[in-house]
Image (cartoon, rainbow, N blue to C red):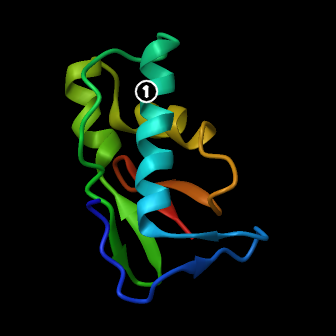
Amino acid sequence: MTAVDTRGTTSWSDSLTSVTPADLDQALLHAVRGAVADGEFAGPVPEDTFLTWADGNYVTPLPMRLAGPSGRPPREVAEVIAGRLAGVGRVAVTGPGYLTIT
């Protein structure tokens, strides 16, 4: 697990379930694996999501790390991953290609 959250679980405002940082890590990796398997972008699936807690949100630069090997702009990679993250909260593509999850 790469996400660190000493608060235990986070209750998402638009979900009836609690999602832990470990759950979110797994959801991100599952989304990437699915996108690669379906040919939405190419490249190796990382072992680390680089998920951090910042300003009340979880944030990951994962799409920017995948952009180079995939040959696609980071924001496009982020949109693909965001579209595959159902049930983990609100997902937004921010900045040059971060995923921000609230």
* 94 over 76 or under it: above or below: below
Q: Report whether residue 7 is seen.
A: yes
Query: Tag 1: Cα neighbours inside 10 Å, few (<14), some, or many (≥20)?
Result: some
Q: Is residue 77 left or right of residue 17?
A: left
In the displayed image of the protein, which residue is found farthest to the top?
A: 39
Per the image, the residue denoted by label 1 is 33
Q: Which of 96 and 11 lies nearest the eye of the viewer? A: 11
The percent coordinates of residue 50 (x first, y second) are 25, 56
Camera-side residue: 16 or 99?
A: 16
Q: Quadrant of residue 73?
A: top left
Q: Which one is in front, 39 or 21?
A: 21
Nearest to the observer: residue 41 or residue 38:
38
Q: Position of residue 66 (x, y in %)?
A: 27, 32
- Residue type at the position of mark 1: Arg
On screen, residue 84 versus residue 67, left or right, reads right
Can residue 99 be seen by looking at this rendering?
A: no
Residue drawn at point x = 37 percent, y = 46 percent:
97
Seen in the image, is 16 located left or right of residue 56? right
Q: Write the residue at 27% across / 18% down.
A: 43
The count of marks equals 1
Residue at 48% from the left image edge and 58% from the top image edge = 24
Q: Tell me the element at label 1.
A: helix
Q: Quadrant of the N terminus?
A: bottom left
Q: Position of residue 49 (x, y in %)?
A: 30, 50
